[in-house]
Each structure stands twice: as structure tokens, then as C-alpha cells.
Image (cartoon, rainbow, N blue to C red):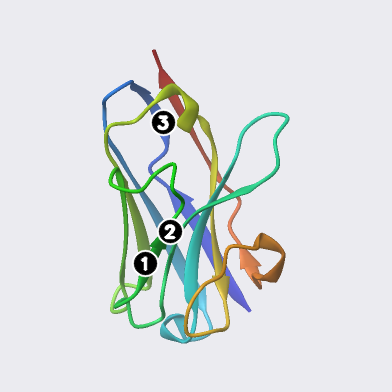
Amino acid sequence: QVQLVESGGGLVQAGGSLRLSCAASGRTFSSYAMGWFRQAPGKEREFVATISWTGDSTGYADSVKGRFTISRDNAKNTVYLQMNSLKPEDTAVYYCAAIGRAMGVLNPGEYDYWGQGTQVTVSS
């Protein structure tokens, strides 16, 4: 089992920044690729970013490329999502997820463990 706890969400004005954290406990964190997803009201959960279990490979949704950066610290069992130049359309509940593979995938249904989510609200 892997337990994931997100933090760092909040209310920010458009153009601002937030850094989300996801702390993992349980099985070996470095054995899992990690992903960030988000879900806005009335919409399906969508892929945001992913990082390999070593941290040397990353992938992003086109909508956040160049604005968001995913990173991980395996010594601290934590994955981060730095979000810059935030837009109102980034408003959603953000979830981190773990998948027992070397690299993450876009399909949320393939992830093994999920956090409870953290709300990000961007005002215009």
C-alpha cells in the first residue's frame, strides 16, 4: 500500500503561483512513477503531468506545458507540482497518483494509488 497526501492548494489571483506537494508513505516511493491530475466541477479527471521513478523523465499536458513543473525528491518521499502563470481555467481539485511502472501514463484508470486531492482556485 502507498498512502498519498497532497497539500499546498489555495486561492490565488490569475498570473500567480502555487506549489503543490504530495507526501508518500508505505511501500518504496522510488519504485513508482508519479502523476498529477485535476478535476474541475462537471468535468472528467484529466492528466496534468507525470514523472518517472528516477525523476529524469517528465511529461506534461499541452495546456500546462511551459507553466507547470513536476519534480520529486525520493529522499523525502515527495513529489511536487510548481504552477506558475496560473489561469482561471486551472481551477480544479488536484490529485497526485502513483503507478508501479518506470514512467507514468496519461490514463488515470491505470494508476494504483491516489491522494484525497487539494483545491486550487484561480480568480480572474
In the image, residue 106 above or below residue 81? below
Provide residue 59's location: percent of width, then percent of height: 41, 63
Q: What residue type is labelled 3?
A: Gly
Provide residue 65's location: percent of width, then percent of height: 35, 48
Q: Name the residue under label 2.
A: 22
Q: How far apart are marks 1 and 3 (CA)?
A: 19 Å
Give the numbered dot on residue 121: none
Q: Distance between the residues labelled 2 and 1?
A: 5 Å
Query: Could you classify mark 1 by the number of other residues whose Cα lies within 10 Å: few (under 14), some (14-19), or many (20 or more)?
Result: many
Provide residue 24's location: percent of width, then percent of height: 47, 69
Q: Which of marks 2 and 3 is nearer the N terminus?
A: 3
**Residue 115 in the figure: left or right of residue 87:** right
Q: How many labels does the image show?
A: 3
- Callout 1: SS: strand
Residue at image coords 42%, 38%: 9
CB under 8 Å between discs 2 and 1: yes
Q: What residue type is labelled 1?
A: Thr
- Callout 2: SS: strand
Residue at image coords 61%, 51%: 116
Front-lying residue, 37 or 117:
37
Q: Name the residue under label 3.
A: 10
Q: How far apart are marks 2 and 3 (CA)?
A: 15 Å
Q: Which of marks 1 and 3 is nearer the N terminus?
A: 3
Residue placed furthest toward the top: 124
In the image, residue 114 above or below residue 86? below
Q: Is the N terminus in the top left, top right, bottom left or bottom right quadrant?
A: bottom right
Front-lying residue, 67 or 97:
67
Q: In which quarter of the image is residue 124?
A: top left
Provide residue 10's location: percent of width, then percent of height: 41, 31
Q: Name the residue under label 1.
A: 78
Q: Which amino acid does label 2 sit on?
A: Cys
Residue at image coords 51%, 72%: 104
